[in-house]
Image (cartoon, helix red, strand yellow):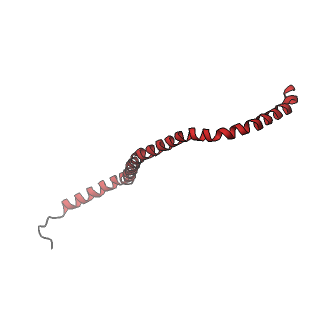
Amino acid sequence: MISLILLPIRLVLAILTALIMLPLGLLLLPFALVLWLPFLLIRAVFKLVKIVVLLPLLLIALVVGVAVAGLALLAAVLVPLVPIALVVGLIWLAYRGVRPYRRFPV
């Protein structure tokens, strides 16, 4: 309950402190930017190096992934056709064995 009574006093003191510190903050802002700018540049350089190093690796991984996915799709389409191909092959083999062999087709 006491915190609710003291709330307006805390708000007034916070506003006064902010108003007193504002000129000091504005004076120190150029120094903060001068001191912080090299770190921002180093961070940007590290990000650029990371992109330059990882981009080719990611592209290689992408190509390999697409190739594996293509092979999986090809296998998924062809594997169910294997029994049909075996039956057709056996029928063709049996038919080839029944008809006479001709050296020169007529």
**Residue plotted at (73% across, 36% down):** 21
Q: Position of residue 98 (x, y in %)?
A: 19, 61
Q: Is residue 29 above or below residue 79?
A: above
Quadrant of the drawing holding the C terminus: bottom left
Q: Residue furthest left?
A: 103
Quadrant of the drawing holding the N terminus: top right
In the rendered structure, the answer to whether residue 40 lies left or right of residue 87 reads right
Q: Position of residue 23 (x, y in %)?
A: 72, 39
Q: Is residue 82 above or below residue 10?
A: below
**Where, by quadrant of the figure, is residue 37 drawn?**
top right
Q: Position of residue 78 (x, y in %)?
A: 36, 54
Asked whether 42 or 79 is in front, the reply is: 42
**Residue plotted at (77% across, 34% down):** 17
Q: Position of residue 102 (x, y in %)?
A: 13, 67
In the rendered structure, the answer to whether residue 88 lies left or right of residue 28 reads left
Q: Residue furthest top?
A: 2
Q: Residue furthest front?
A: 27
Q: Residue furthest bottom?
A: 106
